[in-house]
Image (spheres, rainbow, N blue to C red):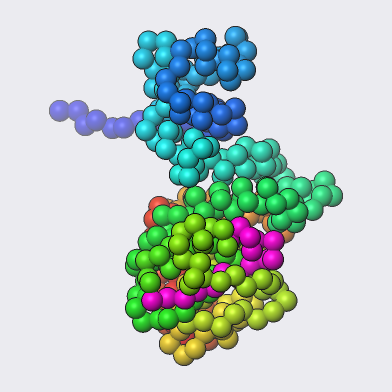
Amino acid sequence: MERCVSQPNPEKILQTGLAFWASKTLLSAVEIGVFTELAQGAEGFEALSGRLGLHARSARDFLDTLVALGFLQRDGDRYSNTPETDLFLDRRKPSYVGGILEMANARLYPFWGHLTEALRTGQPQNEVKSGGTGMFETLYADPARLKGFLAAMSAISHGANMTIARKFPWSNYKTFVDVGTAQGDLAVQVAVANPHLRGNGFDLPEVAPIFEEYAAAAGVADRLSFIPGSFFDRDLPKADVVMMGHILHDWDLPTKQMLMRKAYEAIPTGGALIVYEAIIDDDRSKNAFGLMMSLNMLIETPGGFDYTGADCAGWMKDAGFSSTRVEPLVGPDSMVIGIK
């Protein structure tokens, strides 16, 4: 009996090499507003392509590609959203996660075209490259753009934020501060799930009205306050627990270590630091999202990078924390906890 030996197959190589075809199709659909339009209900091809302003040459191929990719459904000549695209890609719904895709389309997609140059020079490939301001300066200068960006950050972090709110032993603590709080979803979820806690969001002053509006809408404004400031210029606010979600990877190693030291000084003995983002597995071979996020930091920042749980635990120990542990959250995200 012959033994069946699997032969090398180029399919994965070709699928990954051309994956930007599918990515850009979805990003353009979000930009054009396909899913928001179809949230009203199914539409025929002629009406839909007309309302979206699609050229006759490409309209059917474009819409049918979205069907084949699983983002639209088609019955005869009528197109409709899937349950997922209807919930998450209709701009009118609070569950909309398209903000991060809009940013990917407008900023990251063209910048990632220069990844090879970034790999050879170690230099950012965003607005800074052409003499413009950096990512944060660009975002914070425009209130509308800032609000959209912060909402997008909330959307991609929401599942992990809810998990932290339930999984961490909050009954042992009374106060917390969320450093780089953005819209405040992490602080809000922790407060909602733990009525005994009082907390602060700490971020640049421009974020204050966005944070306060979000906390009020969630019904926790009486237990959440906003503290304006830059962690470069001042100490962190005192609290039993300091949280940093998707913050450390923006910065170079000396800044990461500085923030660890400031967190250590801000909490009492027995207090905790929670760091979370797409923590790379210690073997650096499984969490592809975390590794690619680190490449994104290469594209976007002068010195930022993502890191393993062991890396983070080591920095915590260097800052004085007595014990550390790593716990998975949702998808590629994990949290590293340091106890003083």
Q: Which region is colored magenta?
A: 196-211
Q: Which sits in the foreground, 206 or 316?
A: 206
Report whether 98 appears left or right of 254. left
Q: Is residue 21 something one can see in this rendering? A: no
Image quadrant occupied by the N terminus: top left
Number of labels in the image equals 0
Residue 61, x across and y down, in percent: 52, 15
Q: Is residue 137 something one can see in this rendering? A: yes
Return the residue found at the far left: 1
Q: Which sits in the foreground, 204 or 298?
A: 204
Residue 298, x across and y down, in percent: 66, 54
Report whether 167 appears left or right of 72. left
43 over 174 or under it: above or below: above
Report whether 273 appears left or right of 329. right
218 over 29 or under it: above or below: below
**Residue drawn at point x = 52 percent, y = 81 percent:** 239
167 over 32 or under it: above or below: below
Q: Which sits in the foreground, 65 or 324?
A: 65
**Residue drawn at point x = 42 percent, y = 10 percent:** 77
**Residue drawn at point x = 51 percent, y = 26 percent:** 37
Return the residue found at the far right: 131
Residue 246, x across and y down, in percent: 55, 61
211 over 288 or under it: above or below: below
Quadrant of the image occupied by residue 248: bottom right
Q: Does the magenta stretch include residue 212?
A: no
Residue 72, x across and y down, in percent: 43, 25
